[in-house]
Amino acid sequence: MNFLCKCGHVIRDQTDSLTYKADLLPDNGGWDNFHEPIVKGILDFARSIAADDRKGWLSRNFGPDYPRDLDDEATVSDFLSRFECALRKIYQCTECGALFIEKSKGGEFVMFSPAGEDWKGILKW
């Protein structure tokens, strides 16, 4: 994805680990709709493994066509990736500092301009 900032700079999202991109998890409903299902799902996965029902967990969570030979790390990663849809994207123009916050899933963004000059790198880890 590429889009143009008001200052004329092109903001590109074509790779991972961008220092000017972040995910936003709204506080309202964050636990109920994001954290709690993840915690419960991973605990259920661990309990299913302990009960020798890994294949059953895979069927219940991914359906019959999901590969059964993936290691646990890949399986948990796939499970977690489902929850990315709850996150909205934020981009920052590296030229003028404007923030672009996704209004809702679907790609429409609202722009905010920084009030001061101390904006560089605010989305870095």
Image (tube, grey):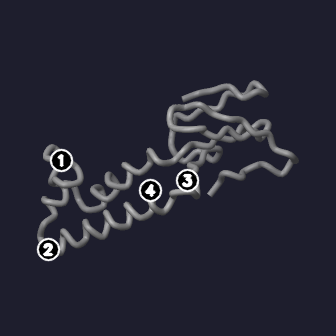
Q: Position of residue 110 (x, y in %)?
A: 68, 35
CA distance for labels 4 and 2: 27 Å
Select label 4 or label 2 by which is in front: 4
Residue 73 higher or lower than 81, as above or below: below
Q: Quadrant of the N terminus?
A: top right
- SS of the residue under disc 4: helix
N-terminal label among 1 and 4:
4
Which residue: 25% across, 70% down? 46
Q: Amino acid at mark 1?
A: Gly
- SS of the residue under disc 3: loop
Q: Position of residue 90 (x, y in %)?
A: 62, 43
Q: Label 4: how many residues lie within 10 Å, few (<14), some (14-19) or many (20+)?
A: few
Q: How many marks?
A: 4
Pointer 1 residue: 63
Q: Is residue 111 left or right of residue 18?
A: right
CA distance for labels 1 and 3: 27 Å
Pointer 3 residue: 25
For residue 33, which numbered disc appears in the image?
A: 4
Q: Is residue 118 left or right of residue 23?
A: right
- Asked whether 68 or 29 is in front, the reply is 29
Q: Label 1: how many residues lie within 10 Å, few (<14), some (14-19) or many (20+)?
A: few
Q: Are marks 1 and 3 in contact (CB under 8 Å)?
A: no
Which residue: 23% across, 53% down? 61
Q: Quadrant of the C terminus?
A: bottom right
Which residue: 14% across, 73% down? 51
Which residue: 60% across, 38% down? 103
CA distance for labels 3 and 2: 34 Å
